[in-house]
């Protein structure tokens, strides 16, 4: 059974995967796997740059959306023509010759990765390049062109070491995706602590972030520039405590992580 | 010819053949980004990375291996191509292709209407008619003025081809006719290094550190901190050598090396690799550097013994830094106001640099090295490197691209190949050596045409001038030579790549320029000012030979079969010139009696590979990979030789050492306040007034930063449909037009009532450029950011552009009085929202032109109305 593993921490955002998909499918007819993708507008695999934080505590994570090739694919039963099927290797295909354009699959897919081709009146999506896998290719195009090894494709049993640290999108839908993600961006709280009187960055301050609901605590130390990044937080409300010997501690009671947070430059006052 | 025949099991039943091509975009007979192109039924099916191990076992090419800190880094078994190469099908089949010879509708030899260049539409003419006109114009110009009245614009970047070279094929023909005036390239993308750093440490010809032999291995083993200074390893590296730079950055992080990015924008490298981003106002780096020097000098953390034996003139520098010259000590507090970096951060940076083994990484271009007075940060960087013992293990300057440039091992920081293959002998384009007696630097074309005579220093060849040439003054017109009256360009990109190109475009409209001939595959940029445009084609349409040498993984020689038939009536650039030569009766002399196949074979024979693979096998297999040299580790890293013994291994400076004070500059230019003997912080001066500290900033309060583009190579690739869909590539305006993004911090946008997606104009005294507002936290306040190289789409030629060609309004003057570089970043502008409907009402004809929703500007846009394609 095939799986695709996407390691967000290794994605440099080059968009090769997105472009390779177009190179393979725009203007090329791979019936019975897929009919040609329109020149623009469809993204069977899509790279989305997610800008996180505010100046100057900013990072970019590149999110990837692609058909999740679910074991419990909601699109399969939703098709009135039984045009969608799951292969023995787990890859889900929309048969372009059976599809009559009901669009039901677009409505039921929680991942919004199925596109509608008006000219051909069919639904279309990623096939994991199964037309190539059925020849002599070992990987889909998107994986072959990835320069950093952020995408891995293979047999589920061979990739357990990656799957052990991976998660899936929208597990609550119980679709059992065959696409796994490593390092999905969570939320961070960042900032910078300094001593205004001595005009210096405060290194080694202890920053403790506490989940107001659960009481869970996460602690980091500020670096040479006085900067701190508490990453991997969930969406919620946190209190932040900043402590450094010789300075009055500072408490920020309620920080919402609806978005990534930059608390900005935080001045600590010397004791005495 | 088929290399591999496979039968498709599905879809159209067809035979696919696989052809190897190089898809790097440097364009100067040294390629990169080797790909495999699958072709069937006369059509390109797909473009893949080249899998080196498809035809050879890895042990046949001896993959290198860097071992450091208990970890291993190895090359991939495939080329690491960028999306610019991967999606290149877009460019081959672009609706922007010139498919037939075109003539400007209102130009003819009796009525030239030069003032309408950039405005007139084009009509289709036959090859015969076009070449008749060209031959008769060439003869007329020769008889009237002499051949030096023809300006050859024939350099720059492009697809990299050998026999069918994109640039310079016409030079030999012009020489056969009696000569020409050459547009010499300034040392673009390296301006500060060439005009500044060479006076400090030599380093011919680029001014960047050389040798960099085995520096990547040494960084892996010894470096603790890398400063990516105005460097984007996720952008500028792409077209030159692919994405090994990206993998290297992940590797450095894996090793625990700290990465600090110093730049106004959170560039694409910083966005994913930076441990710390230190935003700095564009073109204020010299102030930061001086403050770092101040901290080291006052705290005694310089490598004094090294400086005593390896440098000269430190006392004068010390005096300037401490304020002895101008009563301004260059303290972190002083620099904070200028740079926008808190003084406490500057101090930490200085302390870290002094206590950790530090390397500085660069790309080309960027916000650091192309500003007004770029000589100063370049010189200061070298001085700082010297103050921390440059050349000791872990302490280098390294470039994240152009590895092995000039086919020199010493410019390759990666484990070296057995040899570097080369094809110069077969290259039918320009040669480094062929500067004629009359020439004009590319950055002075506007003044040369509009306000002759002009004089300048240096710039006699492409980046190969030794520093001594910088003390030689040239002028145009040369005594006894005519002014230029005709332009022949195969490099029609000045509109979007050169300095104050609005002035250049006005020069193109001058009546003294009687005829402009362009040859180019796409109708773009300066083509819109040509009177005749000849359709050249892409490398997919020709058979050629190439070498991949810039990638850092493996060098290779490529046999590049033809993939598809030429589109329309296009011919390769070489064939275009052959066609004109034939009409002139000079074909035999022009080709040297060799066919294309003959030149390809000549290339193979002289490439250096002939002892390793037969021509027949190369044609059969399509490529051959040069093995890694078995003894690559035996060469010492970088400047170790100079570090260990500067007397035995001197630099090429007059003293043989690093020169804090340049006696030579003092002697030659005693009154130069813009590039004095000791490098200075020069906010503004005689040549430029582009600083927030200058009164002009009241009117133009934003500093604009312009790097080499992420989704283009300079002027190339702007029509690539699949890249234009990427939100950081283009911003769709309310009118459906895809505008070039302008990065604006939300705080600056709010002040101007600008929202994300609005069409804005960026302007100063030199003109107006439209763009799409992209509000982002990735740019520092009071600074705006835009890539250069967007296709020029004039609303008013020479005044207002819709395409986002920001170089139309960049500074007119060269780097400084005696430094003939161009200035393309770090200058003053203002930005405001525009009402696009109002512009549409004001310029209806421009706004009614056809526009391709996917590819943008297209051939039809510039055809005369009713002119069928």
Image: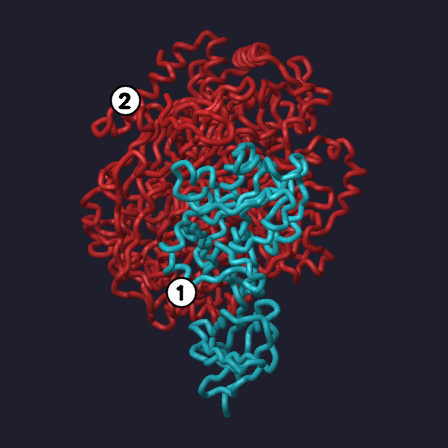
A71 on left or right of B60 = right
Within-10-Å neighbours for mark 2: few <14, some 14–19, many 20+: few
Q: Where does the image place residue A181, in percent across and percent down from the top left?
A: 48, 58
Query: Can residue B763 be seen by looking at this rendering?
Result: no
Distance Cα–Cα, label 2 vs label 1: 60 Å
Q: Is residue B76 above or below residue B348?
A: above
| Tag 2 subunit | B
Q: Percent position (x, y) of residue B167? A: 46, 27
Which residue position is annotated with label 1?
Answer: B293
Q: Residue at x 71, y 35 (%)?
A: B796
Chain for numbered disc 1: B
Sequence order check: which comes first, mark 2 or mark 1?
1
Please identify which colour was used for chain A in the image: cyan
Vertical relation: A144 (above or below) B461: below
Residue B732 placement: quadrant: top right
How many labels were placed on the picture?
A: 2
In the rendering, at what x and y percent does residue B660 appear?
A: 35, 56
Q: Position of residue B394 (x, y in %)?
A: 29, 59
């Amino acid at each position: 059974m095939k799986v695709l593993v996407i390691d967000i921490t290794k994605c440099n955002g080059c968009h090769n995967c997105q472009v390779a998909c177009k190179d393979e499918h725009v203007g090329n007819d791979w019936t019975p796997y897929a009919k040609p993708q329109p020149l623009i507008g469809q993204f069977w695999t899509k790279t989305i740059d997610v800008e996180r934080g505010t100046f100057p505590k900013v990072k970019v994570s590149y999110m990837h959306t692609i058909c999740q090739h679910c074991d419990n694919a909601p699109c399969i039963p939703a098709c009135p023509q039984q045009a969608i099927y799951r292969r023995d290797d787990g890859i889900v295909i929309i048969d372009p010759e059976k599809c009559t354009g009901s669009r039901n699959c677009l409505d039921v897919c929680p991942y919004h990765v199925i596109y509608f081709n008006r000219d051909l009146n069919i639904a279309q999506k990623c096939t994991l390049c199964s037309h190539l896998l059925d020849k002599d290719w070992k990987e889909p195009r998107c994986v072959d062109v990835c320069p950093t090894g952020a995408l891995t494709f293979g047999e589920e049993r061979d990739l357990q070491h990656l799957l052990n640290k991976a998660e899936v999108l929208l597990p609550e839908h119980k679709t059992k995706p065959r696409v796994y993600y490593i390092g999905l961006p969570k939320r961070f709280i960042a900032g910078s602590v300094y001593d205004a009187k001595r005009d210096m960055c405060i290194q080694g301050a202890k920053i403790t972030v506490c989940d107001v609901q659960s009481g869970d605590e996460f602690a980091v130390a500020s670096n040479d520039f006085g900067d701190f990044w508490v990453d991997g937080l969930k969406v919620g409300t946190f209190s932040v405590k900043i402590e450094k010997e010789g300075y009055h501690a500072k408490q920020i009671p309620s920080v919402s992580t609806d978005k990534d947070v930059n608390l900005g430059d935080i001045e600590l006052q010397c004791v005495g | 010819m088929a290399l591999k025949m496979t039968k498709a099991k599905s879809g159209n039943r067809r035979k696919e053949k696989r052809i190897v091509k190089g898809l790097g975009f440097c364009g100067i007979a040294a390629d990169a980004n080797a790909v495999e192109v699958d072709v069937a039924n006369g059509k390109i099916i797909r473009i893949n990375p080249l899998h080196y191990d498809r035809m050879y076992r890895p042990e046949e090419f001896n993959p290198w291996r860097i071992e450091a800190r208990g970890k291993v880094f190895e090359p991939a078994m495939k080329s690491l191509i960028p999306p610019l190469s991967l999606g290149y099908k877009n460019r081959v089949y672009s609706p922007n292709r010139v498919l037939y010879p075109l003539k400007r509708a209102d130009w003819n030899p009796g009525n030239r209407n030069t003032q309408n260049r950039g405005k007139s539409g084009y009509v289709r003419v036959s090859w015969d008619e076009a070449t008749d006109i060209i031959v008769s114009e060439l003869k007329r110009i020769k008889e009237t003025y002499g051949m030096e009245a023809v300006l050859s614009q024939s350099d720059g970047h492009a697809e990299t081809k050998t026999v069918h070279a994109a640039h310079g094929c016409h030079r030999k023909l012009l020489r056969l006719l009696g000569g020409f005036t050459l547009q010499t390239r300034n040392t673009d993308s390296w301006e500060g290094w060439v005009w500044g750093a060479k006076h400090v440490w030599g380093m011919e010809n680029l001014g960047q550190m050389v040798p960099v032999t085995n520096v990547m291995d040494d960084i892996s083993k010894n470096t603790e901190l890398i400063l990516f200074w105005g460097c984007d390893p996720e952008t500028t590296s792409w077209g030159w050598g692919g994405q090994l730079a990206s993998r290297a950055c992940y590797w450095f992080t894996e090793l625990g090396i700290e990465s600090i990015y110093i730049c106004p924008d959170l560039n694409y490298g910083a966005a994913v690799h930076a441990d710390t981003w230190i935003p700095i106002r564009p073109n204020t780096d010299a102030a930061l550097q001086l403050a770092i020097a101040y901290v080291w000098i006052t705290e005694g953390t310089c490598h004094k013994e090294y400086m005593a034996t390896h440098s000269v003139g430190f006392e004068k520098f010390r005096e300037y830094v401490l304020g002895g010259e101008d009563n301004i000590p260059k303290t972190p507090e002083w620099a904070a106001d200028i740079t926008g970096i808190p003084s406490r951060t500057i101090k930490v940076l200085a302390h870290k640099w002094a206590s950790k083994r530090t390397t500085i990484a660069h790309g080309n271009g960027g916000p650091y090295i192309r500003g007004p007075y770029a000589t100063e940060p370049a010189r200061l960087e070298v001085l700082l490197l010297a103050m921390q013992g440059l050349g000791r293990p872990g302490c280098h300057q390294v470039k994240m691209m152009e590895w092995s440039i000039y086919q020199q091992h010493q410019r390759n920081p990666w484990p070296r190949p057995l040899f570097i293959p080369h094809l110069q002998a077969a290259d039918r384009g320009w040669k480094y050596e062929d500067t004629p007696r009359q020439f004009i630097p590319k950055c002075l074309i506007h003044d040369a045409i509009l306000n002759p005579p002009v004089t300048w220093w240096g710039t006699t060849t492409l980046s190969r001038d030794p520093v001594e040439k910088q003390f030689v003054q040239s002028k145009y017109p040369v005594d006894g030579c005519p002014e230029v009256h005709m332009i022949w360009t195969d490099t029609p990109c000045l509109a979007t790549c050169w300095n104050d190109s609005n002035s250049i475009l006005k020069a193109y409209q001058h009546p003294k320029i009687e005829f402009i001939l362009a040859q180019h595959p796409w109708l773009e940029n300066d083509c819109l000012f040509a009177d005749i445009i000849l359709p050249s084609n892409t490398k997919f349409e020709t058979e050629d030979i190439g070498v991949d040498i810039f990638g850092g993984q493996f060098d290779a020689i490529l046999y590049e079969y033809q993939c598809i038939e030429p589109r329309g009536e296009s011919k390769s650039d070489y064939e275009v010139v052959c066609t004109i030569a034939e009409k002139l009766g000079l074909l035999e002399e022009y080709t040297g009696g060799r066919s294309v196949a003959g030149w390809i074979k000549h290339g193979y024979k002289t490439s250096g590979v002939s002892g390793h693979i037969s021509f027949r096998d190369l044609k059969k297999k399509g490529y051959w990979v040069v093995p890694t040299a078995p003894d690559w580790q035996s060469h010492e890293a970088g400047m170790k030789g100079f570090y260990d013994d500067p007397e035995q291994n001197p630099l090429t400076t007059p003293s043989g050492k690093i020169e804090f004070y340049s006696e030579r500059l003092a002697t030659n230019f005693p009154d130069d306040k813009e590039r004095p003997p000791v490098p200075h912080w020069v906010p503004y001066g005689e040549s430029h007034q582009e600083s927030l500290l200058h009164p002009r900033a009241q009117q133009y309060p934003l500093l604009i930063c312009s790097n080499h583009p992420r989704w283009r190579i300079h002027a190339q690739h702007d029509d690539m449909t699949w890249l234009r869909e990427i939100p950081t590539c283009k911003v769709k305006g309310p009118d459906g037009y895809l505008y070039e993004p302008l990065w604006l911090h939300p705080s600056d946008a709010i002040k101007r009532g600008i929202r994300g997606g609005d069409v804005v104009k960026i302007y100063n005294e030199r003109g107006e450029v439209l763009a799409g507002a992209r509000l982002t936290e990735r740019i520092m306040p009071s600074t705006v950011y835009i890539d250069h190289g967007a296709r020029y789409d004039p609303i008013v030629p020479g005044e207002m552009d819709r395409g986002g060609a920001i170089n139309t309004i960049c500074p007119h003057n060269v780097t400084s009085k005696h430094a003939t570089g161009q200035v393309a970043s770090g200058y003053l502008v203002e930005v405001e929202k525009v009402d696009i409907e109002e512009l549409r009402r004001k310029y209806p004809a421009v706004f009614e032109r056809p526009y391709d929703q996917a590819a943008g500007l297209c051939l039809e846009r510039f055809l005369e109305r009713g002119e069928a394609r």
